[in-house]
Amino acid sequence: MPKDFRLIAVYLPAHLFLDWVSYIHELPPLNVTPWNPPAGLAMGMLIAFGPRMAPLVWLALTAGDVLIRGLTVDLWATLVSNAVIAGCYGLAAWIMRSRFGLRPGLERLRDIALLMAGSGIAAAAAGTGYISVFMWIGLFPASEFLPALLRYWVGDVIGIMVLTPVILLLRQRHWSLRLPWPGGVEAAAQGLAIGLALWVVFGPLASSRYEYFYLLFLPVVWVASRHGLTGAALAALVCQVGLIIAIQSVGTETAIMTHFQFLMLALTVTALLLGAVVTERRRAESWVRERQEEFAHASRLTEAGEMTAALAHEINQPLAATMSYARAARKIARRDGVSSQLAEILDKTIAQAERADRVMRSLRDFVRKGERRTEAVVVARLVADSLILAGPGVRQHGVAIVTDIAGGLPPVAGDPVQLQQVLLNLVRNAAEAMIGSPGGERLITLSAGRGEPGFVEIAVRDTGPGFSELVERNLFIPFVTTKATGMGLGLSIARSIVETHGGALAGYRLPEGGTIFRFTLPIATSHDDRHAR
Amino acid sequence: MMTAMPDEQSIVFVIDDDEAVRDALSVHLDLAGLPVRTFASASDFLAAIDPDQGGCAVLDIRMPDQDGIALQQEMIRRGLTLPVIIITGHGDVEAAVAAFRSGAVDFLQKPFDEDLLIERIREAIERDRHSRRLSLEVAEIRVRFDQLSPREKEVMDLVAQGHSNKVIAIRLDIGVRTVETHRAKVLEKMGVRSAPELARMKMRLDEGGHG
């Protein structure tokens, strides 16, 4: 509970402070203002910490009525109306989180959309209840119900839209306030642009109808498109504060104030949605980048392993022959009784060759042991994931990729990262073959279907120039390549991965031109299914 | 009485694609006094081999054109009875199992000691000699057996089963005297002196009859 006390110690003063600054253009004698940031703070608390914060919100609202407005109406009406507000917002926060899966980090566009819809409905409900209580005790005539509700609604919604995202994002610490130097300059320029827009709207050049309000959209859109949701939320907050200060200094009447708040609401909604889209896109991009890096690392490791294995094999034979010759020489030396020094040197020669042999063997064992996860891999997903990795680099060269996955394919057993590497290598190879040749259609077809019993067959086909017979014979030999760059390990790695999975990989020239690489993978058993993704 | 031991020398055939490995091994075999012929590939070996040549084949399981297991299968298909010793890669248990399944008489894992290989080769050659001698004997018995008349063959069967002349006479519904004549003829043609020897021959014939 000490954490809760700290929360109370921060929340209560903050709520009262916001209530106090924002208590302008009110609907006397009630707490109905064109801008109600305490509602945003309360909603942020309720979403972040749950409905158990509702009594605290109720307490803060009541404290505000007592301390700031000097309890202008009956105490019981104040207590009841504030309970309605705290209850509505608490319920809304709970429903958004538990029924609609709102993430308090606002990571997705749908979180922002949900927050907007949820607070719109909650504010309407809270406002209806709040104003009804005061109509009940005869503070308003029924005819004023709708205008009062509208003023209440826009004040609360704008308060929530402007402040709640800032609070939630602050809590998630998704941003760093230490901007790098160029970023700092840009942020300053953006702040300046908002100030400038406000000056144009309300300054000496402005007309009495303030029709330049739309200019505020420009800096806000700039910030949102550059800095995502965090930037959008901050920009909206800065605009709102600037707007209130400007309106206060110009001395606008209440009706216009409410009109401005509607404009401001449109601005905020635009900024937040744009910011959420930008953030979501950036997150997707960074996901792809991370996968690509992970992947590049894994391929470098496999490449190194493949190279070691190939090297070990090449060295193995001459080393074996050397040892064998030396042992024969030792036999002859012993048999003929030639100098004991010669026999001794031959002993040492053999010992050293055996030492080298042990090193090579342990190296090969090490390479062979490379750990492999086995799980049930859905073929369509495997293909899709591989294309996420291979697609961007391939499509920019005008190569089109089509997929043709048979329906109802069972999952295959294997290590998803390694299998992605096989597909990636084949797709890149196909693309490079076509990029290297002039003209013609550039099309890669990725197809998957049932192979021989117990296997799924996946094929990568291209419309490139194909390869010569000589190349066809040496396709899978390490270090043999037709490319100017590269080590000639791609296909050899693909083949060793497929083979360790229990499948087979082969490449053919097609009579109509182009090449096709086909490989098989075993269908996952129920044991693999348990790890299905 | 019986002939002819296989008097040609047994030869060790070494098939390995690496020239140096081949050469070094032949030095060891030379030193051990074993005649050796080396081949760089399975096809060279198959082209040169005489089915009647005794000895032993040493194959590397990993060869580019036809691997050791495939060569072993091909030898069986061609009726080459030469015992085969397969050399497998280090730690390649699966290959070792496959080698045994395919009918290799022995296998050695790399790196191996040449003296151990020579010991195994000698065992294989001994086995080969033995089986060749047996099949040669069977062949000779068959030649003699084929010279018997149908009646003599019947008499030989019954004599080999240990029946007396009387029983044979009743079984075949002929005179005892006639049986005695047949029996003498059979012993003479088969080149033996007694009924137990005849029985042993008959057994050999039945065992080797299908193979």
Image (tube, rainbow, N blue to C red):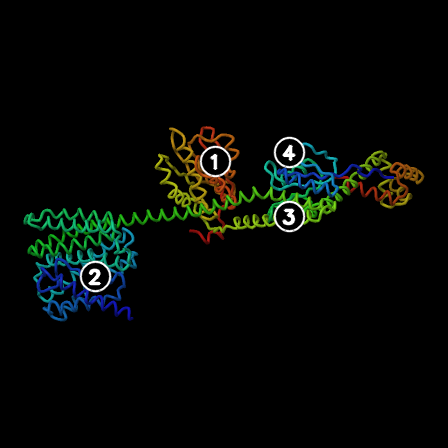
Q: Amino acid at mark 3?
A: Ile
Check residue A481 in the rendering and tell me which mark sits there, or answer none: 1
Task: Answer whether labels 4 and 3 touch (C-beta < 8 Å).
Answer: no
From the image, state whether disc 3 or disc 2 is nearer to you: 3
Q: In 3D space, how far apart are the residues under numbered discs 4 and 1 (Cα atoms)?
A: 29 Å
Q: Is circle 4 on the same chain as circle 3?
A: no
Question: Disc 2 marks which residue?
Answer: A41
Q: Dot 4, crowdedness within 10 Å: few (<14), some or many (≥20)?
A: few
Residue position for label 3: A350
In the picture shown, does residue B112 fall above or below A396? below
Cα gap from disc 2 to disc 4, whole angstroms: 86 Å
Q: Nearer the viewer, mark 2 or mark 1?
A: 1
Query: Are dots 3 and 1 on a single chain?
Result: yes
Disc 2, SS: helix
Q: Are marks 2 and 1 on the same chain?
A: yes
Q: In front: A380, or A368?
A: A368
Asked if disc 2 and disc 1 are in contact, CB closer than 8 Å, the reply is no
* Amino acid on which disc 4 is placed: Ser
Determine the CA span between mark 2 and mark 1.
64 Å
Q: Provide the chain ID for the residue under circle 1.
A: A
Q: CA distance from mark 3 to mark 1?
A: 37 Å
- The tag earlier along the polypeptide, 3 or 1, is 3
Label 4 and label 3: CA atoms lie apart by 33 Å
Q: Amino acid at mark 1?
A: Thr
Report whether A504 appears left or right of B110: left
Residue at 85% over, 35% down:
B148
Element assignment for label 1? loop
**Residue A42 seen in the current view:** yes
